[in-house]
Image: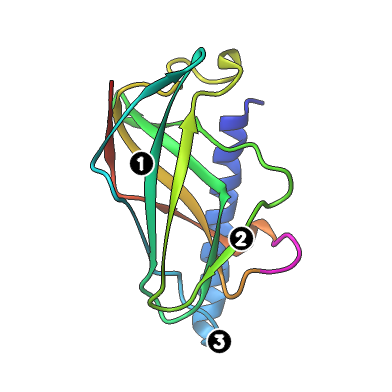
């Protein structure tokens, strides 16, 4: 199964489990669904060609607008491009383990660069699922509470999409 489809399945399961956890948390009052706004500093970024794989760098701004701490990791992220009216995953980082996690307290923000490039094996992706000019959004798995020491279960993440931005040549 290609990485991008696997990531979509993971996000679907994480979202479903996250919603289930959110429903339980709401009834017990421990956590609410995370209210994290993800935007990019740039409305438009330029694609560049690094060797044979097109890429771009975008500055991510994540702001916790909720009343509970949340955590996120660049390893629980993906870039999607709008192709024929559907969002298609064109990038997902390859990380060992869960990668670096950082916590956002209520009202805190984090600003960090995200490098996006086409998959190393284009044959393993759906047709046209490569970095190219177009409309993009980023997807992050947001966790509830403090960043754990051990890898959290998939149900600990809620998929959150960024505002859209453009990539031009």
Residue segment shown in magenta: 148-152
Q: Seen from this angle, which residue lies furthest right? A: 150
Neighbor class of circle 3 (other Cα within 10 Å; few <14, some 14-19, many 20+) is few
Point out the tag, 1 or 2, that comes first from the N-terminus.
2
Q: Seen from this angle, which residue lies furthest left? A: 43
Q: Main secondary structure of the magenta part?
A: loop
What secondary structure is marked by label 3? helix
Q: Quadrant of residue 6?
A: top right
How many tags in the picture? 3
Point out the tag, 1 or 3, that comes first from the N-terminus.
3
Q: Residue at x 51, y 20 (%)?
A: 126
Q: Nearer the viewer, mark 2 or mark 3?
A: 2
Q: Is residue 152 left or right of residue 86?
A: right
Where does label 3 land, which residue? 28
Where does label 1 land, which residue? 137
Where does label 2 land, which residue? 101
Q: Is residue 79 above or below residue 13?
A: above
The Cα–Cα distance between marks 2 and 3, rounded to whole angstroms, is 26 Å
Q: In which quadrant of the rendered image does the N terminus lie? A: top right
What secondary structure is marked by label 2? loop
Q: Is residue 19 left or right of residue 43?
A: right
Neighbor class of circle 1 (other Cα within 10 Å; few <14, some 14-19, many 20+) is many
Q: Is residue 18 above or below residue 82?
A: below
Q: Nearer the viewer, mark 1 or mark 2?
A: 2
The Cα–Cα distance between marks 1 and 3, rounded to whole angstroms, is 33 Å
Neighbor class of circle 2 (other Cα within 10 Å; few <14, some 14-19, many 20+) is some
Q: In which quadrant of the rendered image does the C terminus lie? A: top left
Q: Position of residue 99 (x, y in %)?
A: 66, 51
Q: Position of residue 137 (x, y in %)?
A: 36, 41
Q: Position of residue 111 (x, y in %)?
A: 41, 58
């Amino acid at each position: 199964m290609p990485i991008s489809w696997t990531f979509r399945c993971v996000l679907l399961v994480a979202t479903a489990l996250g919603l289930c956890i959110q429903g339980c948390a709401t009834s017990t009052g421990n956590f609410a669904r995370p209210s994290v706004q993800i935007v990019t500093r740039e409305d438009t970024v330029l694609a560049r060609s690094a060797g044979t794989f097109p890429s771009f760098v975008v500055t991510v701004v994540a702001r916790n607008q909720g009343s509970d701490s949340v955590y996120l990791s660049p390893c629980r992220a993906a870039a999607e491009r709008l192709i024929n009216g559907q969002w298609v995953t064109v990038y997902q980082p390859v990380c060992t383990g869960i990668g670096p996690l950082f916590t956002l307290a209520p009202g805190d923000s984090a600003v960090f660069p995200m490098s996006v490039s086409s998959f190393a094996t284009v044959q393993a992706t759906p047709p046209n699922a490569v970095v190219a000019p177009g409309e993009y959004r980023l997807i992050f798995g947001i966790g509830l509470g403090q960043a754990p020491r051990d890898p959290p279960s998939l149900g600990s993440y809620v998929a959150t999409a960024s505002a859209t931005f453009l990539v031009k040549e």
